[in-house]
Image (spheres, grey):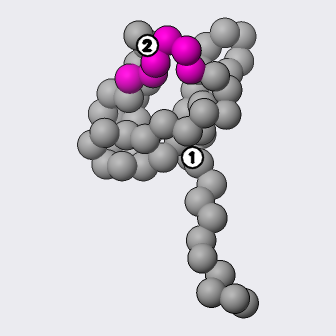
Amino acid sequence: MASLSCPECDAGIALPSDSVQGEIVACPDCGQSYELRESDGAFTLQAAETVGEDWGE
């Protein structure tokens, strides 16, 4: 199982062996969500876009 460091708090984020590009993973320490990006067979973390409630606006 591979792992990456959280850009926010530097904690380790374990990646399952069946991870795919676009999958959302969360940091176990700070809770920040990241989208997995794959390039040349290696994964990187990109901050996941959050969709907020617009309350009908």
Is 47 situated left or right of 11 in this image? Answer: right
Q: Position of residue 7 (x, y in %)?
A: 44, 39
Kindly indicate the quadrant of the structure image that contains residue 1: top left
Q: Residue 44 versus residue 53: which sits nearer the camera?
A: 53
Give whichever of discs 1 and 2 has the lower sequence position: 2
User: Circle 2: is it few (<14), some (14-19), or many (20+) Cα within 10 Å?
Assistant: few
Q: Position of residue 31 (x, y in %)?
A: 36, 49
Residue pointed to by mark 1: 47
Instruction: Tell me: residue 55, above or below residue 5.
Output: below
Instruction: Tell me the distance, in whole angstroms, between the alpha carbons under discs 1 and 2.
Output: 19 Å
Amino acid carrying label 1: it is Ala
Q: Mark on residue 2?
A: 2
Q: Residue 17 versus residue 38: which sits nearer the camera?
A: 17
Which is in the foreground here, disc 1 or disc 2? 2
Identify the main secondary structure in magenta.
loop
Is 21 situated left or right of 5 in this image? Answer: right
Instruction: Tell me: residue 13, above or below residue 52.
Output: above
Residue name at image x 40 percent, y 45 percent = 8
Residue name at image x 30 percent, y 33 percent = 11
Magenta stretch holds residue 35: no
Is 57 situated left or right of 5 in this image? Answer: right
Q: Mark on residue 16?
A: none
Residue name at image x 33 percent, y 35 percent = 10
| Residue range corresponding to the magenta coloring | 14-19
Is 24 situated left or right of 30 in this image? Answer: right
Residue name at image x 33 percent, y 27 percent = 12
Q: Residue 26 versus residue 39: which sits nearer the camera?
A: 26
Q: Position of residue 13 (x, y in %)?
A: 38, 29
Amino acid carrying label 2: it is Ala
